[in-house]
Image (tube, grey):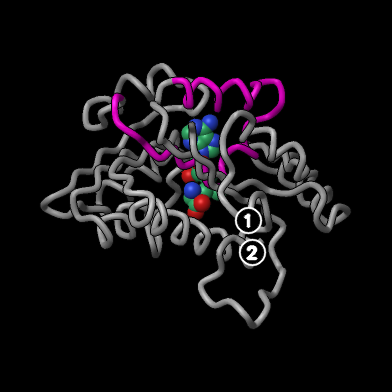
Amino acid sequence: MATGARANRQFLARAVRHLAGEAGIRQFLDIGTGIPTANNTHEVAQSVAPDSRIVYVDHDPIVLLHARALLSSSDAGQIDYLDADLRDTGQILEQASGILDFSRPVAIMLIAILHAIGDDDDPYEIVARLLEAVPAGSYLALSHGASDIDAEQMAEVAARINRLSQQKFTPRSRAEVTRFFDGLELLEPGVVRVEEWRPAVSGFGVPKQSAMWGAVARKT
Ligand SMILES: C[S@@+](CC[C@H](N)C(=O)[O-])C[C@H]1O[C@@H](n2cnc3c(N)ncnc32)[C@H](O)[C@@H]1O
């Protein structure tokens, strides 16, 4: 889990660097912020493009308390923090429109959060509603716990978390994760383990250690 968490944060940083850099994105909707750590979305985005605007969303008040205390924007950019549930896309979109302009491209970041949404809450519909609200040229960056990497161990991890924790864990297969990108144009290399998504150092082989799928795709 620790290895996966580290690889996931590095994936987030590489994805944001690409989005703010080559892709020219200046607006980020980061849902499932988590406790601030290294390479937070705004730090990476604003290091590339200082005028980037980021809305962080989480439903955990402790996360938001830390985020407000620790995450501060560049002078040229802007950050906001929303206390909202991913399942309430209407509230998120309405409140985020305070600083995000939804007539211009937005990167929707769903990094290590969708596995907290069980099938009963229809995660595909949630993602579709968010994508509907953004114009062509927007992006979806997503990572997700895998049910088909180290499948037995992951099933055990899921069973334990679901027994012990209020926050549920539904790992999904590569095919199920790929479905979140239906109708979008997947950037190379597609849906891969997070550490394999455009690794910073290539040519030496990337150690495969995480049980997380990740990808970035463009709305056309
Ligand atoms: C595993 S952390 C991921 C943090 C960060 N995105 C990363 O990848 O390092 C998941 C975060 O999603 C938040 N979260 C889980 N379910 C949520 C929901 N339904 N609505 C909003 N936030 C949620 C949790 O509070 C937690 O902060």
Q: Position of residue 7 (x, y in %)?
A: 58, 64
Identify which residue, 206 or 23, lies in the foreground.
23
| Label 2 close to label 1 by CB (< 8 Å) | yes
Q: Position of residue 67 (x, y in %)?
A: 32, 48
Q: Residue at x 34, y 57 (%)?
A: 21
Q: Quadrant of the N terminus?
A: bottom right
Amino acid type, mark 2: Glu
> Does ligand 1 reach within 8 Å of label 1's beta carbon?
no
Residue, far front = 220
Callout 2: few (<14), some (14-19), or many (20+) C-alpha neighbours within 10 Å? many
Judged from the image, the secondary structure of the residue bearing numbered disc 1 is loop
Q: Residue at x 28, y 44 (%)?
A: 26
Q: In the picture shown, does residue 45 fall above or below 113?
A: below
Indicate yes or no whether the magenta region holds residue 99.
no
Q: Position of residue 110 (x, y in %)?
A: 51, 41
For the magenta stretch, what is the residue range? 103-132
Q: Residue at x 68, y 78 (%)?
A: 205
Closer to the eye: label 2 or 1: 1
Indicate yes or no whether the magenta region holds residue 124.
yes
Q: Position of residue 160 (x, y in %)?
A: 77, 47
Q: In the picture shown, does residue 183 fall above or below 216?
A: above
Identify which residue, 9 or 217, lies in the foreground.
217
Amino acid type, mark 1: Pro
Q: Splitting the image into 4 quarters, where does residue 208 fall?
A: bottom right
Label 1: which residue?
189
Q: CA distance from mark 2 to mark 1?
A: 8 Å
Label 2: which residue?
196
* 161 on left or right of 104: right
Residue, far left = 75
Identify which residue, 65 or 7, lies in the foreground.
7
